[in-house]
């Protein structure tokens, strides 16, 4: 993994898509007449997907458009594995059901590789 050191903690060479559920997802998740749990919007549950780093909003949008089906399937199957209960897979539904936030600064506090940058290295570990 490549890191850049600007301060004390390295920045990983990744971006993150943070996914939160919107009301249509919550309504769907709570519509099942079974003994399973109900989705609690107050739980503040979110999913994070590591993705390539991007500098432009348009690049993030293009990545989402190319990968929304994988993310949508993962988010839906994490609640209900029966595809027949899922909505139609479209970018429009993806955006209606899920809030997506791109995070461009990913700090690594758990990887011991960064603890000691190699001698003579300015940025990359």
Image (spheres, rainbow, N blue to C red):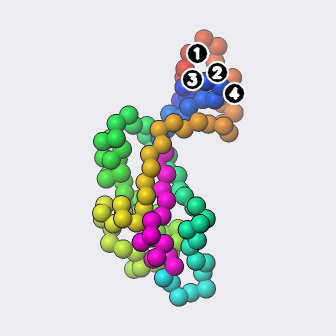
Give the residue number, with chain letter if any, for mark 3. 6
Q: Position of residue 64 (x, y in %)?
A: 36, 51
Is residue 106 placed above or below 91 in the rendered structure? above
Q: Are marks 1 and 2 in contact (CB under 8 Å)?
A: yes
Instruction: Describe the element under mark 2 as helix, strand or loop.
Output: loop
Please identify the quarter of the rendering in which residue 108 is found. Answer: top right
Please identify the quarter of the rendering in which residue 91 is found. Answer: bottom left
Q: Which mark is residue 96?
A: none
Q: Residues within 10 Å of mark 2 (few under 14, many from 20)?
A: some
Is residue 86 visible to us here? Answer: yes
Q: Which of pointers 4 and 1 lies earlier in the amino acid sequence? A: 4
Please identify the residue farthest to the bottom as the structure is shown.
33
Q: Residues within 10 Å of mark 1 (few under 14, many from 20)?
A: few
Which quadrant of the figure contains the C terminus?
A: top right
Q: Which mark is residue 115?
A: 4
Q: Are marks 1 and 3 in contact (CB under 8 Å)?
A: no
Q: Residue at x 57, y 23 (%)?
A: 6
Q: Position of residue 23 (x, y in %)?
A: 44, 70
Instruction: Describe the element under mark 4 as helix, strand or loop.
Output: helix
Q: Which mark is residue 121?
A: 1
Q: Which of pointers 4 and 3 lies earlier in the amino acid sequence? A: 3
Instruction: Describe the element under mark 3 as helix, strand or loop.
Output: loop
Q: Are marks 3 and 2 in contact (CB under 8 Å)?
A: no
3D distance between C-alphas at marks 2 and 4: 6 Å
In the image, which residues are magenta? 16-30
Q: Are marks 4 and 3 in contact (CB under 8 Å)?
A: no
Q: Which of pointers 3 and 2 lies earlier in the amino acid sequence? A: 3
């Amino acid at each position: 993994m490549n890191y850049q050191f600007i301060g004390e903690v390295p920045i990983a060479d990744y971006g993150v898509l943070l996914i939160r559920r919107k009301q249509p997802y919550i309504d769907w998740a709570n519509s099942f007449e079974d003994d399973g749990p109900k989705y609690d919007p107050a739980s503040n549950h979110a999913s994070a997907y590591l993705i390539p780093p991007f500098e432009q909003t348009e690049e993030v949008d293009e990545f989402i458009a190319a990968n929304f089906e994988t993310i949508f399937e993962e988010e839906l199957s994490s609640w209900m594995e029966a595809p027949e209960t899922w909505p139609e897979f479209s970018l429009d539904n993806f955006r209606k059901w899920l809030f997506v936030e791109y995070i461009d600064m990913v700090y690594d506090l758990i990887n011991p590789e960064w603890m000691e940058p190699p001698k003579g290295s300015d940025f990359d570990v």
